[in-house]
Structures are given as structure tokens and as C-alpha cells.
Amino acid sequence: MSQGYAIELYFDPALENQVLKAWNVLARRQISTQLIEIESRPHITLFSSPFIEPAKLENVIKAFASKQEPLALSFSSIGSLPHDNNVLFLSPTPSVSLLQFQSQLCEAVKREGVEIGEEYRTDSWVPYCAVAQEVPKTRMAEAFCVLRDLKLPVAGYAMDIGLVEFSPVRELFSFVLGNTVEA
């Protein structure tokens, strides 16, 4: 049974590898292996909902992706969310282009009758790329220290957008930005 769906923004191979390096260091230190275990891929979540009809969104996302260009990203800081699942993340340097990209996507999804939850509304969305989930509270400081050793900022491009079902993560479809051919 699906826990939900997410529209995710994926990175170029070099940037993806930088994020995977963080995942692997945290896994080797036995701090967090959750993202690896659920078969996730480094990404920024643009929208998520427990109830989506994937078939209804495929053409919307395909059309949206075809009108976009690869998006410059720079992860420049480390953060944590105040939720119970102790997420650590890399935060992209805020940019108008990233905020507009997410806002325009949500508008396109909304036109299909999908409700946009509070955390994905333009005035409250926090873009981030998770590097660890379910970090034990007693190991949060150590995890931050490990992540501080990354050579930030790491920069690259968002290249694809896709819809996944979770958990575990299963990609339903993805599209290259600026292209009408499936990724």
C-alpha cells in the first residue's frame, strides 16, 4: 500500500554524486541508512500528497518539463527539520528561478484539481535535499559534524522531474527538463 506520491526534481550526475557521497559517509558511520534502504534518489521534493492519480498528472508534468530549462542549483548550507523523523538536509541557495519553478508546477497541478498542501504553498515551501532520515537524537551532533566536512557549496543543475510512489520509492515516470522525450 502506497504511503503517498511526490514530484521530485533530480540533479545532473556530478551533483547527484556529491549528495550520494554524504549519504554513504553517514551510512558507513551507521548514523543513517534510511534513504538508501528505501531506494530513494537525491532530489528536492517539489510537491507531495498521499492522494494523487498518477495517470492524471503524467501529461501535466511532461508538458511542464518540456517548457523548462535545466535549473542551476547550489547547495550551500546544512539544516534539520523539526519533525519526529530527524531529517538532515542540504539546503539550496535561494533563487527566484527555483521558487518560480516550484510555484508554476504547483499551479499546473492545482489546475488538475489536486489540492496543494500548506507545506508546498509558495509562501511556506522550504526547498531541501535530504541526506539523512531517522537520525537518532543522540547522533545528531555527530551527523552535523560529518556533513560540515563536505566541501560546500556544491553546485550543479536540476535536469529531470519525476513522479514517485513511496515507500519504498518507485519512480513512475520522469522527464528531462527542456525535452519532450522521457528520461
Image (cartoon, rainbow, N blue to C red):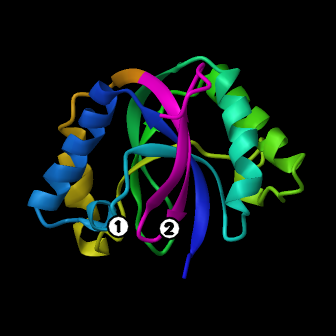
Closest to the observer, 110 or 132: 110
Q: Secondary structure at mark 1?
A: loop
- Specify start and end residues of the magenta stretch as a single range: 157-183
| Residue contact between numbered discs 1 and 2, judged by CB atoms under 8 Å | yes
At 36% from the left and 64% from the top, the residue drawn is: 133
Whichever of labels 1 and 2 marks the residue nearer the N terminus, that label is 1
Q: Is residue 137 above or below residue 42?
A: below
Left or right, 11 with reference to 139 = right
Q: Is residue 6 above or below residue 123?
A: below
Q: Residues within 10 Å of mark 2 (few under 14, many from 20)?
A: some
Q: Three-letter amino acid code at disc 2?
A: Phe
Q: Residue 89's spot in the image, x, y percent?
A: 40, 49
Q: At x 19% / y 58%, what residue is drawn?
A: 142
Q: Which residue is mark 2?
A: 166
- Disc assigned to residue 38: 1
Query: Which residue is situated farthest in the bottom direction here?
Result: 1
Would you say residue 145 is visible in this rendering?
Answer: no
